[in-house]
Amino acid sequence: MTPSAPEGIPGDIEYLRLPRPAELFERRASRFRELAPGHPMADFLEAAAHLADAQRSALARVNPPPPPADLSEVPLRARSFRRGPEWRSGLTLLVEEARRAPWPEPAQAALSHLASAGADRIEALGDAVLAGTPAPADLAAASFTAAGLQVYFTALAARLPAEKVARSPAGCPVCGSPPVAGVVLGDDKLRYLACSLCGSEWNLTRIQCWTCRATGGISYLALEGDDGGLRAEACQGCGGYLKLFYRERRPAAEPLADDVASLELDLLAAEEGWARSGVNFFLIGGEG
C-alpha cells in the first residue's frame, strides 16, 4: 500500500528520495574539495574527499540482495538488518583505496588494522558503529568502518521502490538512522532530511523538531556574517538542534560535507547549551 501524505503536506510532494550511490559519493568528494581551499580544516576536508572517492570505488564490490518483501516499516533497519558478506568486500576495497591518501599516523594504523582484521572483528566493529558504541581505542577504525557501511546501505536503499516505503515517525524511513542535516529547497521551501547512513532523503514540514516533533519553542542559530545559507534549528522541548542548508543560498551544498565544514556552528550551539541531534559518521569521536 502506498503511504498517504502526512498532515499538512500536499499529496503531490515527493516524500522519499532514494540515493543514486555513484552520483552521491562523487558529489560528496567534489564538495569536500570545493570547501577545502582556505578552510581551517583544509587537510581534513581533502582527506575526506579521498575517502568519498574510495566509497565510490567500493561500490564495485557491493552486489546487494533483492529488496525485502516487507516494506511496511523501516525495511533496512540498520541495527537489526542481517548484513551480507558483500559489505565487507566493499570495505576491503575502500581500505585499499583509502591507504593511498596521506592520512596521519593514527588513521594509517587504523587502515592497516582493518586490512588485516578477520570477519568477526569487522562485524563487531560494524555492530558497534551502528549502535553508536565504538570503543575509544577503535574510533579511527570505526570511522572507516562507517564509510564502508554507508556504501552498503546506500547500495541497498537505491534498489527499493520508494513509493512503497512507509513513512516513519522518527529517523530515516529506509534504515531508521538519524539525519546528518537537512536541506531546504529554493522557492518551495520544502525541507528534506538527509540520512546519515543510507543517503536517502525524506520530507518533513519545516519549523518542526525532527526528534520530538514539537512545533513550538523552535529557534534558529546562525554564525555572524553568514549569508543565510546555514542555520541550526534548535528545539526548546528536547534541547537538540539540527543544521539546515538552504539551497537558494548554497546551491552546491552536500549535507555531509557541508556539515563537516561548518563545525564552527556546532561550537556556537554547544556554548549556548544545545545538543547535536544529527549524526555524521565522518566525525566519529569528534561530535560534541
Image (spheres, helix red, strand yellow):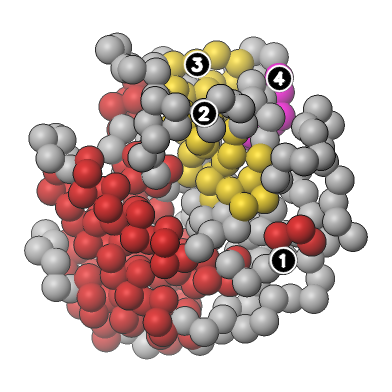
Mark closest to the chain's N terminus, 2 or 4: 2
Mark closest to the chain's N terminus, 1 or 2: 1
Q: Nearer the viewer, mark 1 or mark 4?
A: 1
Q: What residue is shown at x 17% (from left), y 43% (from top)? A: 36
Q: What residue is shown at x 11% (from left), y 59% (from top)? A: 104
127 relative to 209, above or below: below
Q: Nearer the viewer, mark 3 or mark 2?
A: 2
- Kindly indicate the quadrant of the structure image that contains residue 2: bottom right
Q: In the rendering, which numbered label is found on residue 186?
A: 2
Give the residue number, with chain letter if any, for mark 3. 220
Q: CA distance from mark 2 to mark 4?
A: 22 Å
Mark 4 neighbour class, 10 Å CA radius: few under 14, some 14 to 19, many 20 or more:
some
Tell me, yes or no, if residue 266 can be seen here: yes
284 relative to 230, above or below: below
- Kindly indicate the quadrant of the structure image that contains residue 287: top left
Query: Who is closer to the viewer here, 187 or 54?
Result: 187
Q: Nearer the viewer, mark 1 or mark 2?
A: 2
Q: Quadrant of the C terminus?
A: top left
Mark closest to the chain's N terminus, 1 or 4: 1
Give the residue number, with chain letter if any, for mark 1. 161
Q: CA distance from mark 1 to mark 2?
A: 26 Å
Look at label 1 and name its amino acid. Pro
Q: Where is residue 283 shown, x and y percent of the image?
A: 34, 48
- Kindly indicate the quadrant of the structure image that contains residue 57: bottom left
- Callout 3 secondary element: strand
Look at label 3 and name its amino acid. Tyr
Q: In the rendering, which numbered label is found on residue 215?
A: 4
Prevailing secondary structure of the magenta residues: loop
Q: Which residues are magenta?
A: 210-215
Mark closest to the chain's N terminus, 1 or 3: 1
Look at label 4 and name its amino acid. Thr
